[in-house]
Image (cartoon, coloured by chain):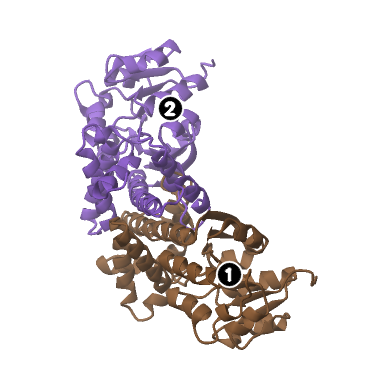
Chain colours: A brown, B purple
Amino acid sequence: MSNSLPPLGFIGLGIMGAPMAGHLLRAGHPLHVFSRTKARAEPLLAEGAHWCASPAEVARRCETLLINVTDTPDVEAVLFGPNGAADGLPRGGVAVDFSTIRPDGARSIAQRLAERGVDFLDAPVTGGQVGAQNATLTIMVGGDAAAFQRVRPIFERVGKTIAHVGPSGAGQSLKACNQILCAVNMIGVCEALLLANSAGLDPAQAIETLAGGAGGSWAWTTLGRKIIAGDLKPAFMIKLIQKDLRIVQDAAERAHVPLPGTALAQQLFRAVESEAGGSDLGTQAMIRAYERLTKLT
Amino acid sequence: MSNSLPPLGFIGLGIMGAPMAGHLLRAGHPLHVFSRTKARAEPLLAEGAHWCASPAEVARRCETLLINVTDTPDVEAVLFGPNGAADGLPRGGVAVDFSTIRPDGARSIAQRLAERGVDFLDAPVTGGQVGAQNATLTIMVGGDAAAFQRVRPIFERVGKTIAHVGPSGAGQSLKACNQILCAVNMIGVCEALLLANSAGLDPAQAIETLAGGAGGSWAWTTLGRKIIAGDLKPAFMIKLIQKDLRIVQDAAERAHVPLPGTALAQQLFRAVESEAGGSDLGTQAMIRAYERLTKLT
């Protein structure tokens, strides 16, 4: 392991953050970590990462801080809360947020950090747990172009498609577009599978036959197969896409853009959330809402 | 050109039928053709196809009859109307219908032809005009398995993915599922592009960046690009997908399956149809309905 690479801080070691931090550690970056649940850090600590008692302590040990938590208030707390990282980051440092948060939240954070001489990049990802594990994530980055170029080698350790898409907030805006596609495409998958079922078609053959045509999508091939296998385990949890779709509709409301298909997806996910444990299922569990609307199972 | 291949009949030489018939002619099949508009047959006649004055005359000259018209009543008229093909087809012959029609219509036609000792295969296609021209269509076939095997070499001349998916009507049922996916995925494409536009993102970069991820679809990549280029020319006309979605909802109604996403797509397409010339635009013109709902263009 080379120690010529600069130290990095990583805050938030959930199902996405932990494998991403692991790639950076194994690439040779000294890694300083903090997570709300220390147990989640243990595998990384066993590989040589250093535990810190607070976000501020992480920030004092690096010039580049990576964050992967859940929602806008979580990122704000990590940076500006008690023992927050903002106090520890040096002027000229950069904070990179992989979480999916509100675009206007990202712009506000960038503004506050800029006042301290710290760059902020919003860098939400798509590709799920598998993408994090295989370092094949798509990373959508908003913020200063020079800061993006500085951080790019780090992005390349954890992602495959890396795009600087505009100023602060632009990464989050594009992630919002992605979540619209994921949510609405799932409606099509469910309705097509229901009709296939009602017509007595073999659903596996249906997926295979239509996959390469004009109806094809990642959702059809990947999540459709999970549905017919009865596998509703989360690759991406319903409660998280619902959080993201609230961000989508909030941005759309400000822009006076009606999104009726997205709204329908939210309502169907809500029906699944009303079941015990429903919000922890994967997004493909939208099929449960349709099953309740029909006599089909 | 070899004449060892059996003669074929082809009825309906529209934007799909004409290139499909051309592949069969150039493969060496003597080809007997009829179309409502004779002008559409002229290029094929120049290549050696034989014009017939009626469907019945086509049927008398072949044991395998291929049909590519529009809707259920059109197929019924070709077969059972005045000078219809059913009277000309020999016992042991087979009629193959590439049109997209009602699954129960296909079953009824199969029943009527079976009484005359003639097999019927419903064989709707997807892949559009480009797929027809390049012989890369997906063909979804319902009907007798032995008849499917007999016709298979012909399918392989015009398509790439060829699947026998069940008894009579099954091909049409699977095509209905495909049209659900096409219609609903388009909702996602429009809403994601609208939000991208409102956020000031570069739409071409948005499409490129999200194409390979969990939001990706054929509609996003292919029709999204047409939308941002302002190209609303039909690869598949709104009036035709609306016809297909009526078939979808009719089948779903009989099966007591609610399809709210598909219904939303129908309403949005209807808004575009209300404009002069709207129904002749491609399905990507759904964006027009959204543009009217917003101040964005």
Q: Which one is nearer the viewer's eye here, A38 or B213?
A: A38
Residue plotted at (37% across, 22% down): B9
Q: Residue A40 lies in what quarter of the image?
A: bottom right
**Disc marking residue A117:** 1
Q: How many marks?
A: 2
Element type where label 2 sits in the image? helix
Question: Image check: A74 left or right of A54?
Answer: left
Q: Is residue A151 left or right of residue A248?
A: right
Camera sees residue B105: no
- Which quadrant would residue A186 be assigned to in this image? bottom left
10 Å crowding of disc 1: few (<14), some (14-19), many (20+): some
Going by the numbered disc 2, the residue's amino acid type is: Met
Q: Residues within 10 Å of mark 2 (few under 14, many from 20)?
A: many
Query: Which secondary structure, mark 1?
Result: loop
A189 up-or-down from B48: above or below: below
Residue A206: image x %, image y %? 42, 52
Q: Relative to residue B73, is residue A120 depicted above or below?
A: below
Q: Is residue A281 visible?
A: yes
Q: Quadrant of the C terminus of chain A?
A: bottom left
> Residue B287 versus residue B19: which sits nearer the camera?
B287
Residue at image mark 2: B20
Q: In which quarter of the image is residue A150?
A: bottom right
Label 2: chain? B
Q: Position of residue B267 (x, y in %)?
A: 22, 48
User: Is A161 positioned to the left or the right of A72 in the image?
Assistant: right
Read off the chain for label 1. Answer: A
